Image: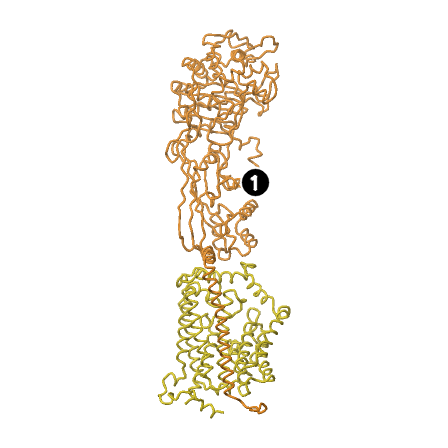
Chain colours: A orange, B yellow
Amino acid sequence: MPQYIALKDPLRESRIYSARTIGAIILVVGLLAVIVVRYHSLQITEYENYRTQSDRNRIQLQPLPPKRGLIYDRNGVLLADNRPSYILSVVREQVPDLEATLVELQALVPVSDSDLEKFHKKLTRRRPYEAVPLRFRLTEEEQARLAVNRYRLPGVVVDAQLLRHYPHGELFSHALGYVGRINEREVLMLDETQYRGTFHVGKVGVEKYYEDILHGEVGYQNVESNAHGRVLRVLERHAPTPGADLTLHLDIRVQQAAVDALGDRRGAVVAIDPLTGGVLALVSAPGFDTNLFVNGISSVDYSALRDSLDVPLFNRAIQGQYPPGSTIKPIMAMAGLESGLVTPESTVADPGWYKLPGDRRKYRDWILRIRGTGHAPRVDMNMAIAQSCDVYFYDLARRLTIDRMYEYLHPYGFGTRTGIDTTSERPGILPSTRWKREAMAQPWYPGETLSAGIGQGYMLVTPMQLAVATSVLASKGQRKTPHLLQAIDGQPVAPPPLEPLIAKQENWQEVYKGMREVVHGKRGTAKYLAKGIEYEMAGKTGTAQVIGIAQNAVYNEDEVAERHRHHGLFIAFAPIEAPTIAVAIIVENGGGSSAAAPIARAVIDTWLLGEAG
Amino acid sequence: MGDYVRQMPHQGSDDMARPPSAAMRFHIDVPLLLLLMALTVYGLFVLYSASGQSMAAVIRQGRYFLVAYVIMILGAQINLQRYMRWAPWLYLLGVGTLLAVMFVGVGAKGAQRWLEVGGFRFQPSEIMKLVVPMGVAWFLADRILPPRAGYVLGALILLGLPALLILQQPDLGTALLIAVSGLFVLFMAGIGWRYIFGAVVLAVASAWPAWMFVFKDYQKQRILTMLNPESDKLGAGWNIIQSKTAIGSGGWQGKGWMKGTQSQLDFLPESHTDFIIAVLAEEYGLRGILLLLSIYLLILLRGFWIGLQAQTGFGRMMAGSLTLTFFVYIFVNMGMVAGLLPVVGVPLPLVSAGGTSVVTLMAGFGMLMAISTEKRMVAR
């Protein structure tokens, strides 16, 4: 057919159309094959990968923080418990604009700069979808404000958490220590797994020392949540193991009696049960409200505590190092008797002063400035202890020499940490020629031995060491590591006993006799304590100089500034026939032992008689 | 010409002997109807799960289907010759409404696509999906095929004008779909391969200038996101990451009906509309995808078969174009959700929730049925 005649050719059109249809079908099937290949690669080849990703989308591992163990005193009185507290947290992944959300939150509840700082630090260390705390201890009103606005604050979570609480606040501040928010340094040291979901850790004291026991074991739950972060169901749950409850040897009545007796004076009281080594009271005054520290103390509060002249954060009972003064004399007497250098009958001439052979210097007895003479022409041991005769112990110290003094005193726990189950204990100083050579690179001078003999000079003890030494005396050489912990979850625990100090029975009795005279004797230095006493108490007074007093100067209490007054010390145990309590007391700038001794009476009365003296 | 057709030898003479069945009387193509019903029922099951077990959503969609089936059946009753006669007027009306949209249209999300008439809103571009191929097919129907260059140019103008009007709304996706539906008419009309290759070369060559001068920022962003969804994990990439995760985590078996965690826990966006295929893939697995694709393939093959059986050029071209356009919907939607193509607003045909596209698509199938009965009518 000639081409120029334009005629429709249905057969040809139909043929072309068929060809095009076949082409179209090939195209369609080919492209559908591409789709099938694509879906196959997603659903079969990369199935595991996407399955994991989809599970990670919906399943979150949430840590379940364990409940911190409670702390009781020996009578079952709660000293540290946990209270529900509301926490405002933010889940970063669910917050569209973090800065805007924070600004909005700050408009709703007060958020301090330190809260924000901690929040941002924690933010960088979180796991995906982990709620990062912003504010602790929301008030009812703050909770309500957040609840009302929650719908427009995605990713903002308010939930309850148990928070440490100290019902007796200040009373046990130094005995218990406290917990606080985990800081950066602690994060590096703590077990990351165990502390997921835990915001607090023991910072000082028993709370820190027994952190492992108190903390418990973290639990986990796998939760399924939707794209908006709402938890829909719990898939799997491993309950946390709560921390163990601790029972301490502390007796709230004794502790209270000590605090009351100290009043607003600075000082420390330690009471120990000589039979067990259990610490019945551990007081350092002034104390502070430990609850302030639980959620990060405000900088104002902290500055006030830190900058106070009374250093309330300083635990005088275990960190304070004081010259023991005359409280060392009973132990010196034991050394004298055990070494055979003195007998109960042997006497020393007491003109009121002592001179070293070939030395013009007079070492004065404290009685000299009061009476102008010695205690008596000749002084025996009993009188030397009862009236705290310095000359007797100057003579004993000289004959004993400093290094043997070290040998005899060391077993009582001086010069080393007692090993009590709390933190920050200091070792004190028990001087010796070797110590002076190493610490000061100087030789030992004979005069220094005399000072050491009456607990002055280089010797420094903590109230805890003094109490331990008193306890060793009281138990006739039974040495125990002092400890606060009595039982874990009701199971009694005790540190292993130390090797006992072997000494002659009659020597103990001789020293006891002297110490009894201190309280019960007519001329005892603490005879005022005997008034109305219902048991026999052995005691020893002590005074520690805060500033040096020149050779011939006279110490006048009224004239010295309050903070330059002598520290008053007192050690005691009772009842003498079967001691159940040994105490050591120091009252800073108390002027003399009369500031400290009545506290011992109050504490021991409470312990033995169950009431405040 | 008509006489010639009547003498086509392959037309069965049995038709004459048998009394017309109900299906034939109502111009229903039974295989196509059954396939469409299977597809819509399957889609409703997926929708129930995808909408968060919302019976209300299923009922609403069922109502759309009901309307759409009625329109399809009504459309099937109209004689193909009448469609052809209407085609130019419908085309002019369509272009007119697009112009009206330009000046008095109602906008949403920065695009002006709707026309409001007596409180009733409609989208003229949607109707153009049918009107443009009709216009082009009408224009070519009486020409000698394959069409000469001048007619090809005429056809290109016919499809290009509305496409450009829609492009400036702006609605790139619909503009391309409409242009493509017109191009399919030309393809089925048998234009030379040189035109086709030329067009492909031109398309590739114009990609760069188009990127520089035509595409808007959001369109560029979509393409960039498709190429690397990880670049914007919580923003634009989120959709595609979550949809791929949903599809992939379905595996072969699927997680089970209403047990797709990606979709049920709201990780998957647009789960009941454009991204519904991800729900299907997640809950029914690759098995479910293959079943869906099988139904689609059978519908497409039936469409091509109807085209092959059609008696007039208009019918043939329309059948081919409608079928291929239906396929484009499938390919673009499934490709985009699986991260093969950029995200464009194309629903999965007859499965995604929504009324407009369902009505247009079913009206198209109505016309396809009209084409399929034409042959039988003519044969008689």
Residue A326 located left or right of residue B206: left
Q: Nearer the viewer, residue B121 or A398?
A: A398
- Residue drawn at 56 percent across, 36 percent down: A304
Placement of the C terminus of chain B among the 4 image quadrants: bottom left
Query: Residue A94 at what x, y percent from top left?
Result: 51, 55
Query: How many circles with numbers are drawn on the protein?
Result: 1
Query: Residue A449 at what x, y percent from top left?
Result: 56, 15
- Residue drawn at 38 percent across, 27 percent down: A610
Disc 1 target residue:
A299
Q: Is residue B108 above or below residue A522?
A: below
Residue A369 located left or right of residue A272: right
Q: Is residue A136 above or below residue A396?
A: below
Query: Residue B205 at what x, y percent from top left?
Result: 62, 71
- Residue drawn at 40 percent across, 54 percent down: A233
Instruction: Report if residue A184 is visible in the image.
Output: yes
Mark 1 belongs to chain: A
Query: Residue A373 at what x, y percent from top left?
Result: 55, 9
Q: Secondary structure at mark 1?
A: helix
